[in-house]
Amino acid sequence: MSDKVIKDTIITSSVKMSEGIYSMWLKEEEIAKAAKPGQFVSLYCKEGSQLLPRPISICEIDKKQGLVRLVYRVAGKGTLEFSNMQAGDSIKIMGPLGNGFTLEGKKVILIGGGIGIPPMLELAKSLDANVQVVLGYRDGDLFLKEEFEPYGTVYVSTEDGSVGTKGNVIDAINENNLEADMIFSCGPTPMLKGVKAYAMKNGIKAQISLEEKMACGIGACLACVCKSKEKDSHTNVNNKRICKDGPVFYVEEIDL
Amino acid sequence: MNMKVNIAGVEWNNPVTVASGTFGSGKEYGEFVDLNKIGAITTKGVANVPWPGNPTPRIAETYGGMINAIGLQNPGIDLFCQRDIPYLQKFADTKIIVNVCGKSTEDYCEVVERLADEKVDMLEINISCPNVKEGGIAFGQDPKAVEAITKEMKKRAKQPVIMKLSPNVTNIAEMALAAEAGGADALSLINTLTGMKIDINRRTFALANKTGGLSGPAIKPVAVRMVYQVAQAVSIPIIGMGGIMNAEDALEFIMAGANAVSIGTANFHNPKVTEEVIAGIESFMKENNIKDINDLVGCVK
């Protein structure tokens, strides 16, 4: 049997972190017990016209207390509904979904961009390595940054140059002369393309977490595919399912 | 109380199946529901060779529904026969319906012939695929083409043939009659309605394919009306679908004339929906003292 569950669960806290970014803790012991960094859950809307579950990455897992934390951006009607929920409200959840990160490397760089930052937090906590964290933001609104500080050295890039390196995450890596034997990354596709190019050029192994519009979230509908280098053994074509085979892939496995 | 239905000589334990493309070959949903409890499993469409499908984004949510343009990505009939059919055979109580797609009559024929010696119970022919030889118009949008392809399928098929009708036509009954004239053993309807969504912030189409098939509860009244019209026109069994979310919806289709129902998009909203619909139909029958589900078929005239 699988370790996935689908059930109604209770929100234990729901707070606004910054403009459009929200943090929610859920009491869900089975998911907390089974979940790994880099996995995600599906949240279901109460509004009946919104049928599809919303895939959201897991930001933190508290196995002792049976809690799961999600940090998400309000991107549409579904996430807007979640942002209006409060502690004590119930919400339907399915998870844990996807493969998650493989924990490896001795000296690693975790690269998060925008709403790709949250899943890097549980990863930073879980790795037994020398952890360097590079976070890319648009401006000086540095949500979650301080929470990474206990787990590694944190470097920041901002598009407007207000904090840290002006530019992108790769600019920050270069400016700080960071070295690593392993890279983990999650963020917008243009950033992941840059991370892939950087990792390949420098011969560093890298895992990246992808995003795509999903329907079922469990690998049945084939909505959320990415292009794979090799013919995939399940689909029998050069497509992998992000929700099931991913969301985490080694950079050399896929075409971005 | 009898929940068994007979669709073209094949007895299902209950009148519930799943809509092709929403349920893969069952494996992923087997983690949430007992596949032995579903009357029949209709597989995702399979072609003679693997199809890579469309670019992403392939889906977008719309009010009370979704549009999809997966592009019939499938692993091809060889891997399907090796892997998916043996998996489905483990569920002895559940009938296996293989959905067949193709870009030419020859493609369809090849798949149907390949399936002749496989242990599957029924074939469902998706005639909403573009016919490359006829300039890309779907097989299912011209009654002559519907009759012709049905005849070709019937010549080759060892299993009963279900023709799946497209709703993107002026007169659905005409298509149903054409399929019946071609020798179809049963009909399933409706496939998705062609739709479009525009992302106003990016000033682009929500789907890479521009258009996609609309499904979900938004289309249910259209589907119920079409099932009713087809039921009035033909005498072969009908599998009704289009936006079924619960037992009440399923019963609407049955009362409109469907002998069985398929659940599609609702699986994405609730992976356990198939079992819940079956249980809900049973409760309705108990409450209303109905001894046989078949007594409700087409009871609203």
Image (cartoon, coloured by chain):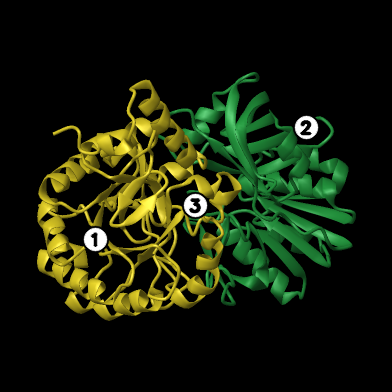
Chain colours: A green, B yellow
Name the residue at 28% across, 57% down: B8
Using a 10 Å C-alpha cutoff, classify the residue at mark 1 as few (fewer than 14 neighbours), some (14 to 19) or many (20 or more): many
Is label 1 in a helix, a strand or a loop?
loop
Reading the image, the residue beneath label 1 is B185
Residue A43: % across, % down: 56, 37
Residue type at mark 3 is Asp
Image quadrant where one finds the C terminus of chain A: bottom right
Q: Quadrant of residue A244?
A: bottom right
Tell me which amino acid carries mark 1. Asp
Label 2 sits on residue: A66
Label placed on residue B295: none
Q: Which mark sits nearer the N-terminus, 1 or 3?
A: 3
Nearest to the eye among marks 2 and 1: give it. 1
Q: Are marks 1 and 3 on the same chain?
A: yes
Residue picked out by circle 3:
B93
Most foreground residue, A180 or B134: B134
Q: From what the image shows, is residue B182 above or below residue B194?
A: below
* Cβ–Cβ under 8 Å for marks 2 and 1: no
Q: CA distance from mark 1 to mark 3?
A: 22 Å
- The residue at the point 43 percent across, 67 percent down is B73
Q: CA distance from mark 2 to mark 1?
A: 54 Å
- Where residue B20 sits in the image (x, y, percent)? 39, 56
